Image (cartoon, rainbow, N blue to C red):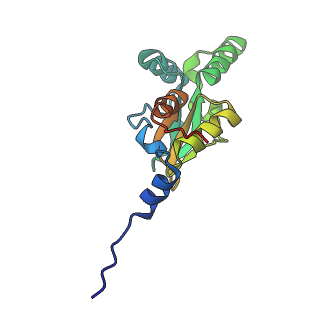
């Protein structure tokens, strides 16, 4: 009688590389917005939670954009220029729709390379188009403390 054990191939691939998955370090309890939210609400939440950006989700929890402090500053200037209150502006009109996201099965070194290449503060982590979390530069630096380096 032969016995063939089942292996978790995803875990084996990560173990082979020696780098931990980004999912171990990503934030999962995120402040998110909907496209029809008012920018005034966004600014309030940014100040209340001391964050500088957040994902924008549709009704199916799919990632459709990112709204940032920079986007909100554009709203403030547009409001002054057009003499309108900030509340007349909506997330859908100012969010970034061209999103660079991290795959759910990426490792911390893959993401570190992405940060060097793109210069963003954070990346959304998605699986099948659905937001699963967010990873920041600081999360990757935390992970770096656990990376085993080899001398040749």
Quarter placement of the C terminus: top right
x and y, in percent, of residue 82 in the image: 71, 15
Q: Residue at x 39, y 63 (%)?
A: 8
Quadrant in the rendering for residue 49: top left
Given residues 131 and 117, the one toward you in this image is 117
Q: Is residue 25 left or right of residue 96?
A: left
Q: Is residue 62 left or right of residue 114?
A: left
Q: Please say if 150 is above or below 50.
A: below
Q: Residue at x 43, y 37 (%)?
A: 25
Given residues 109 and 100, the one toward you in this image is 109
Extreme-front residue of the structure: 152
Residue 90 visible to an observer of this rendering: no
Q: Is residue 131 left or right of residue 113?
A: left
Q: Please say if 92 is above or below 71.
A: below
x and y, in percent, of residue 19 in the image: 50, 45
Given residues 125 and 63, the one toward you in this image is 125
Extreme-left residue of the structure: 1
How many numbered circles does the render carry? 0
Residue 123 visible to an observer of this rendering: yes
Extreme-bottom residue of the structure: 1
x and y, in percent, of residue 5 in the image: 33, 73
x and y, in percent, of residue 106 in the image: 53, 49
Q: Is residue 76 left or right of residue 103?
A: right
Quarter placement of the N terminus: bottom left
Extreme-right residue of the structure: 81
Q: Please say if 14 is above or below 92.
A: below
Quadrant in the rendering for residue 90: top right
């Amino acid at each position: 009688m032969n016995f063939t054990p089942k292996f978790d191939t995803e875990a084996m691939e990560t173990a082979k590389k020696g780098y931990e998955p980004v999912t171990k370090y990503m934030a999962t309890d995120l402040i998110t917005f909907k496209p029809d939210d008012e920018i005034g609400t966004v600014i309030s939440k940014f100040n209340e939670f001391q964050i500088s950006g957040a994902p924008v989700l549709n009704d199916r929890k799919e990632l459709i954009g990112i709204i940032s402090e920079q986007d909100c500053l554009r709203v403030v200037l547009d409001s002054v220029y057009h003499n309108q209150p900030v509340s007349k502006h909506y997330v859908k009109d100012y969010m970034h729709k061209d999103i660079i996201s991290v795959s759910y099965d990426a490792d911390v070194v893959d993401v570190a390379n992405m940060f060097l290449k793109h210069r963003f503060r954070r990346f959304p982590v998605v699986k099948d188009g659905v937001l699963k979390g967010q990873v920041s530069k600081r999360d990757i630096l935390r992970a770096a403390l656990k990376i085993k380096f080899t001398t040749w």
